[in-house]
Image: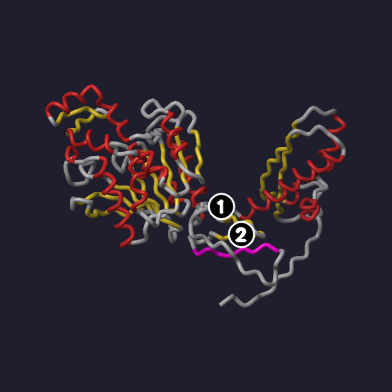
Amino acid sequence: MPTERFQFPGADGQMLDAALDLPNGAPAAFALLAHCFTCGKNVLAARRIADELAKRGIATLRFDFTGIGASEGEFANTTFSSNIADLVAAADYLRKSRKAPAILIGHSLGGAAILAATAKIPEAKCVATIGAPSDPAHVTNLFKESIDGIRKTGEVEVSLSGRPFKVKREFLDDVAEHNLTEAVKQLHKPLMIFHSPTDDHVGIDNATRIFVAAKHPKNFISLAGADHLLTQKRDAVFVADMIATWAMRYLDMPSEVDTPDLPDGIVVMETRQGMYQNLVAAGPHRLLADEPVAVGGLDSGPGPYDLLLAGLGACTSMTMRMYAQRKNIPLDRVTVRLKHSQIYAKDCETCETKEGMISRITRSISIEGKMDDEQRKSLMVIADKCPVHRTLTHEIDIVTTATEAAS
């Protein structure tokens, strides 16, 4: 994914170093990501989340706060309030140069700062926090043995993650003044909270307090097994994937498709986001179809064959469920796994075609429940009688016509 690197003026005029991770096509939306305390924009979690969001069509701005990384200024002169102001400045830069961020994401203290800054970024449609404290003063636990010294002398150099940082009395006073709970109550935005139950830096109780304070719509996702900094790539990828899927519900995606000739049909229309992304409209339901990044897509939704297999799998499961209900078979759950491949026709003993290549769909069905062998056998027999299965295995007449595009 392409990344643009630049600088923009922060709240106090210092130049802040930034990176904008972009999708291959036109962005579906812009996100603003705030890193954890003293981490910087290039911390693994921030880089991986931004990269994964770009693969899903979302451009993400990450930057170094004043005095961090390659940004100008002195860390000692910063406060929680100045971090909030830097976030607002970053949103303003995006607003003027590209488009205001619709998604706000904050990690650790960056999550607390994002919650406090949201009210000053009116274009934001949704907010996500990762391992965020419910009280910004929580960060002082990282150097609690130095707090008395800071109070007495006004400034002390502390070690954070093995690096020296100067912390002033003004920082302590500032974080103590912020009431994040009140900011969360007034958020009025969809909120997604990610937190690990084994986070040894910011306890899971912080997520509970944020969740309780927030108004609906709100969601909580447990990052079981993850550490505070999301050092395992799979955790960062999971967070990005969930944010992208969840945020699409609140973004300015096409919500209605005019279908005067097919009121009961399926309509598929290009979104003009990326090369292959399409909006699929099925009555009141909406989903995206796309191709993998490897072939030029955004990987923002299942591909055409994925949708075909999903239809067969869903029909199989539903047909077996209806049969089990009619016959009073104690069926607990059906799981259908499907794969599509191309094989040589000569390798198919039951196929009429004997030359060239043909499609093969392999379907594996798992049946759960306390039932006898005859009941299991009857369920497997009925699986081949689902309507989609019959459609795929019988002759199909597809009629294609050209229609005038809506003006």
Q: Quadrant of residue 47?
A: top left
Q: Name the spot of residue 46 as percent of width and height, x first.
A: 36, 42
Residue nearest the viewer, comparing 102 with 303: 102
Q: Quadrant of the C terminus?
A: bottom right
For badge 1, the amino acid type reads Gly
Q: Are marks 2 and 1 in contact (CB under 8 Å)?
A: yes
Residue nearest the viewer, comparing 217 with 273: 217
- Crowd tier of the residue under label 2, counting other residues whose Cα lies within 10 Å: few below 14, some 14–19, many 20 or above: some
Considering every residue shown, the one lying at the far left of the view is 153
Q: Is residue 144 magenta?
A: no
Q: Name the spot of residue 320 as percent of width and height, x first.
A: 79, 42
For disc 1, the marked residue is 301
Question: 330 above or below 381?
Answer: above
Q: Tell me if 92 is positioned left or right of 274 in this view.
A: left
How does the figure colour the protein chain or chains? secondary structure
Residue nearest the viewer, comparing 328 with 191: 191
For badge 2, the amino acid type reads Val
Give me the disc on residue 280: 2
Q: Tell me if 161 is positioned left or right of 245 in this view.
A: left
Q: Element type at marker 1? A: loop
The magenta span reads 265-272
